[in-house]
Amino acid sequence: MNLKGRSFLKILDFTPEEITYMLDVAADLKEKKKKGVPVDFCRGKNVALIFEKTSTRTRCSFEVAANDLGMGATYLDPAGSQIGKKESIADTARVLGRMYEGIEYRGFEQKIVEELAKYAGVPVWNGLTNEFHPTQMLADLLTIREHFGHLKGIKLTYMGDARYNMGNSLMAACAKMGMHFTACTTKTYFPSAELVAECERIAEQTGGSIRLTESVEEGTKNVDVIYTDVWVSMGEPDEVWASRIHDLMPYQVNRSVMENAGENAVFMHCLPAFHDLNTKIGKEIGAKFGIQEMEVTDEVFESGQSIVFDEAENRMHTIKAVMAITIGMPENTVS
Ligand code: CP
Ligand code: NVA
């Protein structure tokens, strides 16, 4: 398997075998990290990290992973560069491509990261766009595989806004890996018909399936993974909070959802999560709408079924794997 020079822009661009390879490398790098075995085979190289939206996990994962691989990392924050304001994406790509061995981009439309990849001449990694969040998918798949021992046949239900980056990406990841994906939400929040059709075609080949349902009872019955995400994503206007809370509160992940899924089901969330009022936005929204919790109750978030912090840790190991594989690893570095 040789993915040297490839960009990592969306899960749909990769075969199930390539995805499995990335997970295997990530698992190996994780084990090496735990044992203190150095993996700094990218010594002397550098990566640029462009963030047009804020981040905790993705930024820290790229920085720690780059450091572990022996690389330098330059962080470009949402305000501190010329990108998109004084300099086009194509020009930025050609400048950074001369200085760095790889470029991470988090921002708005998918077409921006695609454009960056077209002109950079080095691998570009999508650290989240409005449409997709592929590095999150690798972490989620690794976490599910670690927990259940396999991916094929796993039933995953996504509740909430299923037409944005997380819903889209999970549907694609499940289709690729022969898993059974359900979007459980109101019709307005179903992924686009076009993407559903594409994922259905993939699922036919892999033995997976795609289901869209408005019924919480049906959509969450006896599934392995209950997954949710924030109801309002980065870059969306504050005005949408009222309608989102109204539309999506019936799809909140609470005790009855987890009971319906079964005692062996796990709860996952890409994070950050509004599960209490211990955040600035959580407090403001809580006071304005008279609610204590949003997409997930604190009870479920803190329960033994919640594997959200294993999932967060795996962001780093999987991002390390993506960088190492696409920049290029010496042969036999990974067992
Ligand atoms: N899950 C995720 O991408 O988190 P950050 O926004 O903190 O990077
Ligand atoms: N849907 C969320 C995901 C955050 C990791 C957002 O785009 O803000």
Image: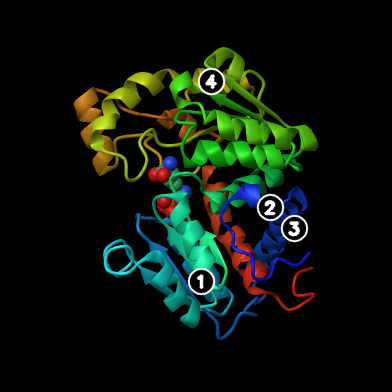
SS state under label 2 = loop
Tell me the CA gap for discs 3 and 1: 25 Å
Disc 2 within 8 angstroms of ligand 1 (CB): no
SS state under label 1 = helix
In front: label 3 or label 2: 2
| Residue 86 percent coordinates (x, y) | 27, 68
Q: Residue at x 63, y 31 (%)?
A: 197
| Residue 285 percent coordinates (x, y) | 24, 32
Which comes before the other along the chain, label 1 or label 2? 2
Q: Which residue is mark 3?
A: 21
| Residue 36 shows in this picture | yes
Residue type for callout 2: Phe
State whether residue 197 is above or below residue 23: above
Q: Which residue is mark 1?
A: 120
| Residue 15 percent coordinates (x, y) | 73, 50
Q: Which residue is mark 4?
A: 257
Residue type for callout 3: Tyr
Which comes before the other along the chain, label 3 or label 1? 3
Tell me the CA gap for discs 4 and 1: 45 Å
Which comes before the other along the chain, label 4 or label 1? 1
Which comes before the other along the chain, label 3 or label 2? 2
Which comes before the other along the chain, label 4 or label 3? 3
Q: Which residue is mark 2?
A: 14
| In-front residue for pair 81/320 | 81
Q: Is residue 323 left or right of residue 276?
A: right
Tell me the CA gap for discs 3 and 2: 11 Å
